[in-house]
Amino acid sequence: MLNLTQAPRTGEFLLSVGNAGISMEIVTLAAGPALKSGQLLGIVTATSEYAAYSNAAADGTEVAAAVLYAPQPERVAATKAAAVARLAEVHGEQLVGLDAPARADLAARFIIVR
């Protein structure tokens, strides 16, 4: 029997967002590996580009600043993408990279993890 594993769907992690698109931002993603919907993002200080959050980093991505809305393929150059940046409730079990410091970082941006 063949077992298939479905990747997270676009925006599946969202529980609620603010009216009129106030929760969303178009951000510039740094070149890098493929990312799943729900990936926590930090901002690379040197370039102001968003990249996968890593609490162990020291380049700005150690602070969770947004949540990637849709999956992104591997990128050889910076590209635009939609992210949840403020005023939202999200499902913690569907976020990629969530830890206690990230929860606090997101709460400061009014992104509440449930």
Image (cartoon, grey):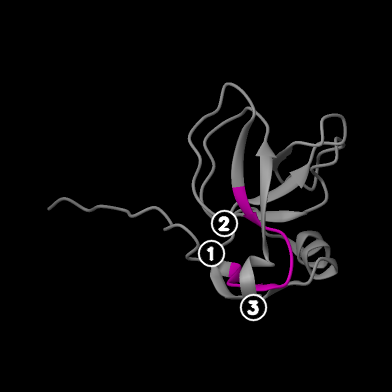
**The magenta stretch spans residue 17:** no
Is residue 82 toward the left or the right of residue 85 in the image?
left
Where is 108 relative to 75, above or below? below
Classify 17 as above or below 8.
below
In the image: residue 48, left or right of residue 18:
right
Contact check, label 1 and label 2, Cβ < 8 Å: yes
Lower sequence index among marks 1 and 2: 2
Q: Helix or strand or loop: what does disc 1 sit on?
A: helix
Q: Residues within 10 Å of mark 3 (few under 14, many from 20)?
A: few
N-term mark: 3 or 2? 2
Q: Residues within 10 Å of mark 1 (few under 14, many from 20)?
A: some
- Whether 89 is among the magenta residues is yes
Q: Could you give the CA–CA distance between mark 1 and mark 2, rounded to whole angstroms?
A: 6 Å
Quarter occupied by residue 108: bottom right
Amino acid at pointer 3: Arg
Quick one: label 2, few (<14), some, or many (20+) residues within 10 Å? many
Give the residue number, with chain letter if any, for mark 3.
Answer: 114
Q: Earlier in the sequence, mark 3 or mark 1?
A: 1
Q: Which residues are magenta?
A: 82-92
Residue matched to label 1? 94
Q: Is residue 56 left or right of residue 89?
A: right
User: Which residue: 68% across, 32% down?
Assistant: 30
What is the distance, in whole Å, between disc 3 and disc 1 at their CAs? 10 Å
* Residue behind mark 2: 38
- The reply to whether the C-beta atoms of the residues labelled 3 and 1 are less than 8 Å apart is no
